[in-house]
Image: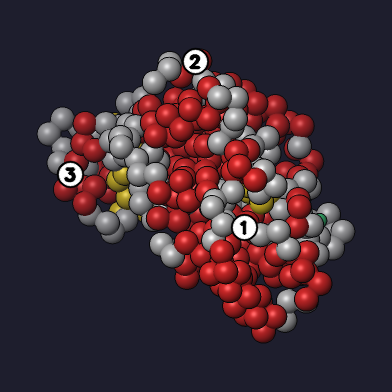
Amino acid sequence: MPPMSSIPKRCVLEVMTDLIRSDRLRRFAIAPILCAIAIAAVACASDKPAAKAASASAPSEIAPAAGGQFGQWLKGLRDDAAKRGIKAKTLDAALKDVQPIERVIELDRKQPETTLSFTEYVERVIPDSRVMLARLRLVENYGLLEAVQKRFGVEPEFVVALWGIESDFGAHMGNFPVIHALATLAYDGRRSEYFRAELLDALTILDQGHIEPDAMLGSWAGAMGQAQFMPSSFLNYAVDHNGDGRRDIWGTRGDVFASAANYLSTIGWKHGEGWGRRVLVPIGFDLEAAAAEKKPKPVSAWRAAGLTDSDGSALPRSEDRKLATLVLPDGVKGSAYLAYDNFRVILHWNRSNYFALAVGQLADRIRNR
Ligand SMILES: [Ca+2]
């Protein structure tokens, strides 16, 4: 594997975003980043970024014809979509060239061979360069982020942190045509039911006129736009912040920020409560037993048990009433964190402790905390 520095960052981030998204779908905890880097290295060494390799218009990248079977399956899907009230005109435009994409199947089949430690993950997902860019993006968009904060009660640094980790601030949304990618996965059979439902939701989004089929781009697994929402999340949480009648999470920053904030707010975000903090534990403390205890305890109880802030100072009394669980991303030998309610809200977005801790840490670093 080539050293990290020799791999174009853009490609690594593109694939990492896809894999992080796949974690959400598979409901497991650790992003297979080494695998991602290997994929990125192969994709980029040939100057053919993984996400771009799947252009549905490039015949060489299309899977061998699925023959009449795919056509028949597509007809059944079209009938279902029509029963949902999706207009024939929308279906004609969205489904006219649809074919299975071989690259999507390859990416779906990839099993991680190894995983990164949390420390390694953080070095890759929130390098100093991303923190710097996040601060710049926050300043550039402050008016908009403040308006979104007023509307949804989510602080700008958390919206920017999610935006940065999900799509590198909109620079890498994935270049797969979402309808084609979802049709591939829905037809494939491994997780058909889930992806068929997402595909029908994606067709509903097109039918509502939020985006044109050609511009509906996303990851290989169908996560769309700058917020990397699956179509079902789009229908539940996407917001038309600028009032032009379209919920545009691809190209309108206000819509992107408001959609992310609306997601967190709907799940139960608590303004001003933070996400948690890194802690030190006293010698002899039974970390394993404490982490296994799933019921949150007040911060005051953790202080009484001897935990301190990461610099050794006492845990702040202002946080005494917050309920916290102990999170050990690298097990008992790694760093320890107290996670508050908002941490669990981020986990709803992506069920990965690595992801949620990275979002929290990036938000803290944006604010110099
Ligand atoms: Ca809009």
Q: Secondary structure at mark 2?
A: helix
Asked where in the image residue 245 lies, by quadrant, the reply is: bottom right
How does the figure colour the protein chain or chains? Answer: secondary structure
Question: Mark 3: few, some, or many residues within 10 Å (few <14, many ≥20)?
Answer: few
Q: Earlier in the sequence, mark 3 or mark 1?
A: 1
User: Where's residue 122, x and y in %?
Assistant: 43, 30
Name the front one of labels 1 and 2. Answer: 1
Q: Which mark is residue 5?
A: 2
Asked where in the image residue 68 lies, by quadrant, the reply is: bottom right
Location of mark 3 (residue): 288
Which one is in front, 41 or 170? 41
Q: Earlier in the sequence, mark 1 or mark 2?
A: 2
Asked where in the image residue 210 lies, by quadrant, the reply is: bottom right
Location of mark 1 (residue): 99
> Which residue is at a point 27% across and 56% down the rendered structure image?
294
Which one is in front, 355 or 74? 74
Q: Alpha-carbon distance for marks 1 and 2?
A: 36 Å
Residue type highlighted by circle 3:
Glu
Residue type highlighted by circle 2:
Ser
Name the front one of labels 3 and 1. Answer: 1
